[in-house]
Amino acid sequence: LAAEGHTGKSTLAAAFAQAGYRVLSEDVSCLRTDSAPAVVPGPSLLRLRPDVTPHLTIPGSRLLRRSPSRVTLALDPERRGSCDPVPLRAVLLLEASANGFARERIAAAEGIRRLWPLAFHVPIDRWRARCFTQLAHVASEVPIFTFARPLRLKELRATVEYLVS
């Protein structure tokens, strides 16, 4: 799942955790591209807005920190898994929808254009070129979709069910 900030990535990740799925990463993902693209699982944390947390119950999680803007939860150690890379099967670019769900596969070139602003950039030309080459590799190996969904808490369960199906 990829998107700019404030688009519901963390809330959707928490909804997956609530439904019993493993969360690989909440905010930043590391991709391995040396062979088949894979996601390296990140810290087993969720950082949620305080107004979202009353609507989600994440089994086995514990409160680590509360600030005015975020509640940080540690996920259940039994459900964390290892740090072994997990094959990347698809990239979903999250978008808001007024109602209902829509998923559409996009061309690799469009995927690169949409993912480039989300990639980590070191301000050194050779590193930027390397990042772009790796992103192009991912886009050539993995299908990229837009995924529009309602940004309403009451739609979270349906969103998870839609994506799982």
Image (spheres, helix red, strand yellow):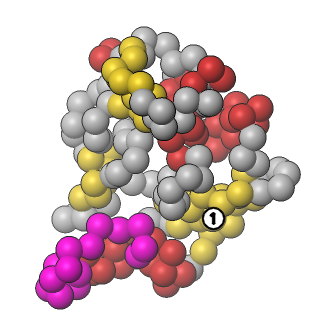
Circle count: 1
Under circle 1, the secondary element is: strand
> Which residue bears the numbered disc 1?
146
Residue at 39% across / 17% down in the picture? Answer: 63
Residue at 22% across / 39% down in the picture? Answer: 84
The amino acid type, in three-letter code, at marker 1 is Thr
In the rendered structure, the answer to whether residue 82 lies left or right of residue 152 reads: left
- Farthest residue to the top: give it: 60
Residue at 77% across / 32% down in the picture? Answer: 154
- In the image, residue 8 lies at what x, y percent? 59, 47
In depth, the one of 90 and 125 nearer the eye is: 125
In depth, the one of 81 and 1 nearer the eye is: 1
Q: Which residues, given as a range, are shown in magenta?
A: 116-129
In magenta segment, residue 122: yes
Above or below, 68 against 77 in this view is below
Residue at 51% across / 75% down in the picture? Answer: 114
- In the image, residue 80 lies at what x, y percent? 32, 25
